[in-house]
Image (tube, rainbow, N blue to C red):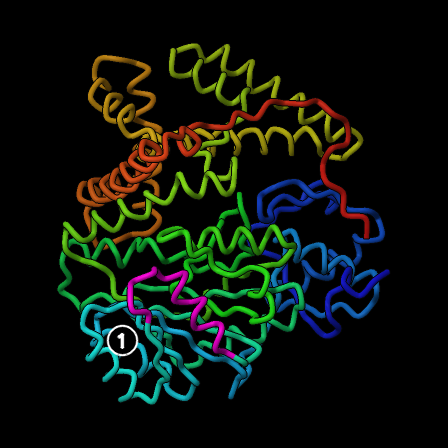
């Protein structure tokens, strides 16, 4: 057994809080992306010890335990448990800048104590940017013409000689001790990059409408739960507005300078394709200045969507707006047409097919029913999101026709029910009506960007769903053998 199939000695791990156990601990659901894992008998004592340890975690000391820990980490079923490690750290900060010298000055003040390289990406008036860099003792290099954030990061990277590089946008301000939290994650040699939680720096109350929305649902804030970042997972990418990366991996996976937007998604996915891991560590926080004016806010959301077609060209299939199960589609269509018995039959067929795949596993019937039910709800929510975003023209038609059409009413429910549920969970400082309006405007602005990019590139790739068909193979739950 090679060392790369084991976790490093002394690295403690804890199970992800969202995992569930079935069949007396032999099956686990969860991970990144979500799935069903089946465990061999030799793994069960180690899993039981991890369950007893809870969030405190434990450090496996046997070869079997370390091999199991490696597989749990690689599937997002567990995460490292790491204490902050006081610096100084071998990290250089690279800060791309385009104007906004006041924001840059605040950013550089938050990076005090680190070697910092500012890359002026063709600012029309370079003087204030130069003055801000000099005032904080940062090294400055300049592009004579604007080349975009990816090129600015690559320029800075070429001048760095530390083992780790922290890319920080000029409108971001890391909180004290952020590197103490992020650097220990690199104790795992498979980790290539770690991202902190980016939180909006909104004014103190009383806040305006958009400030209250941003405080509850910033586009850059990926939430409170740590995650393994990979395509198709709950956290599919991290914004590179603030991220720490191993310098040596950037020799093979540099930022794509052909992308003005979406370069962060592309970067993370190419790291994954190289067999490297990216982790999201929300215990470290970075403040970000959001755009709170209506025009700027909508324009920025629209711009995010315009990267879809180019990303779809580089990563075929990963930008599909929905990946529903064919049987779930049939069930939802039957419900929308008022045929609950046919829908129930479709659900039973899906459960039976999954039950067959889990043949020989105790409790397979209950697990199959649970997985199918969760999948049905998730597919309905995903289709509703697509109707609010990529398929927004059809979504608007469904909303307009919801009073007169059963099918349109079902589509409108799929669109709006998740928004209401999100409001109930997040408890934002907004009433339901304004929350729903802003949430839908958020998705609509992004969706118009996607359709604009699709038209510009003459590509339907970012608009087409991928329908998953059932294949009744026996014993196809992925097996962890340790």
Q: Quadrant of the N terminus?
A: bottom right
Position of residue 208 relative to residue 28, above or below, is below
| Image location (x, y in percent) of residue 450 | 33, 37
Q: Is residue 469 left or right of residue 38?
A: left
Judge from the rendering whether residue 404 lies leftward or rightward of residue 137; answer left or right.
left
Residue at 23%, 53% in the rendered image = 213
Count of labels in the image: 1
Of residues 61 and 139, the one drawn nearer to the viewer in this rendering: 139
**Whole-percent x and y of residue 239?**
41, 58
Q: Quick one: 88 or 331, which is closer to the camera?
A: 88
**Mark 1: secondary structure:** helix
Residue 42, percent from left and from top? 85, 53
Q: Quadrant of residue 392?
A: top left
- The stretch of residues the image draws in magenta is 143-160
Q: Is residue 157 magenta?
A: yes
Residue at the spot x=34%, y=61% of the render?
147
Note whether 247 is above or below 339 in the view shown: below
268 on left or right of 80: left
**Label 1: few (<14), some (14–19) or many (≥20) C-alpha neighbours in 10 Å:** many
Seen from the viewer's position, the closer of residues 185 and 327 is 185
Residue at 62% x, 46% y: name it: 20
Front residue (pair 242, 225) = 242
Q: Residue 10 location in percent, x, y?
A: 72, 74
Q: Which residue is mark 1?
A: 104
Q: Is residue 44 magenta?
A: no
Q: Residue at x 28, y 26 (%)?
A: 395
Q: Is residue 76 above or below residue 432?
A: below
């Amino acid at each position: 057994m090679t060392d790369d199939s084991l976790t490093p000695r002394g690295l403690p791990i804890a199970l992800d809080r969202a995992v569930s156990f079935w069949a007396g601990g032999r099956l686990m659901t969860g991970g990144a992306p979500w799935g069903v894992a089946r465990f061999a008998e030799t793994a069960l004592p180690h899993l039981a010890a991890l369950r007893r340890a809870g969030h405190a975690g434990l450090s496996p000391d046997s070869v079997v335990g370390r091999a199991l820990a490696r597989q749990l980490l690689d599937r997002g079923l567990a995460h490292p448990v790491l204490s902050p490690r006081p610096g100084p750290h071998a990290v250089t900060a690279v800060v791309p800048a385009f104007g906004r010298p006041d924001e840059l000055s605040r950013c550089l003040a938050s990076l005090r104590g680190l070697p910092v390289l500012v890359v002026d990406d063709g600012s029309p008036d370079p003087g204030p940017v130069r003055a801000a860099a000099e005032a904080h003792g940062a090294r400055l290099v300049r592009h004579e013409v604007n080349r975009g954030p990816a090129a600015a990061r690559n320029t800075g990277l070429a001048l760095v000689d530390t083992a780790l590089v922290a890319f920080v946008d000029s409108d971001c301000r890391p909180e004290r001790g952020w590197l103490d939290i992020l650097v220990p994650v690199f104790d795992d040699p498979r980790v290539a990059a770690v991202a902190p939680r980016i939180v909006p720096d909104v004014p103190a109350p009383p806040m305006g409408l958009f400030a209250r929305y941003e405080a509850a649902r910033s586009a850059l804030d990926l939430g409170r739960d740590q995650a393994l970042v990979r395509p198709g997972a709950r956290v599919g990418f991290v914004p590179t507005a603030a991220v720490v990366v191993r310098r040596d991996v950037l020799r093979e996976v540099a930022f794509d300078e052909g992308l003005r937007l979406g370069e962060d998604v592309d970067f993370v996915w190419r790291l994954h394709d190289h067999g490297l891991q990216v982790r999201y560590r929300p215990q470290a926080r970075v403040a970000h200045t959001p755009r709170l004016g209506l025009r700027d806010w909508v324009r920025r959301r629209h711009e995010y969507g315009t990267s879809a077609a180019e990303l779809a060209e580089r990563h075929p299939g990963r930008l599909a707006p929905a990946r529903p199960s064919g049987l779930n589609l049939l069930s939802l269509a039957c419900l929308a047409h008022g045929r609950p018995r046919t829908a129930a039959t479709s659900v039973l067929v899906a459960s039976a097919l999954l039950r067959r795949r889990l043949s020989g596993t105790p409790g397979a019937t209950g697990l199959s029913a649970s997985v199918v039910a969760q999948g049905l709800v998730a597919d309905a929510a995903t289709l509703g999101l697509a109707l609010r975003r990529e398929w927004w023209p059809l979504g608007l038609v469904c909303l307009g026709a919801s009073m007169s059409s059963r099918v349109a009413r079902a589509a409108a429910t799929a669109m709006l029910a998740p928004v209401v549920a999100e409001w109930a969970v997040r408890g934002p400082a907004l009433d339901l009506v304004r929350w729903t309006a802003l949430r839908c405007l958020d998705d609509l602005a992004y969706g118009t960007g996607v359709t604009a990019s699709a038209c510009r590139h003459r590509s339907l790739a970012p608009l087409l769903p991928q329908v998953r068909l059932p294949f009744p193979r026996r014993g196809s739950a992925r097996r962890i053998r340790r």
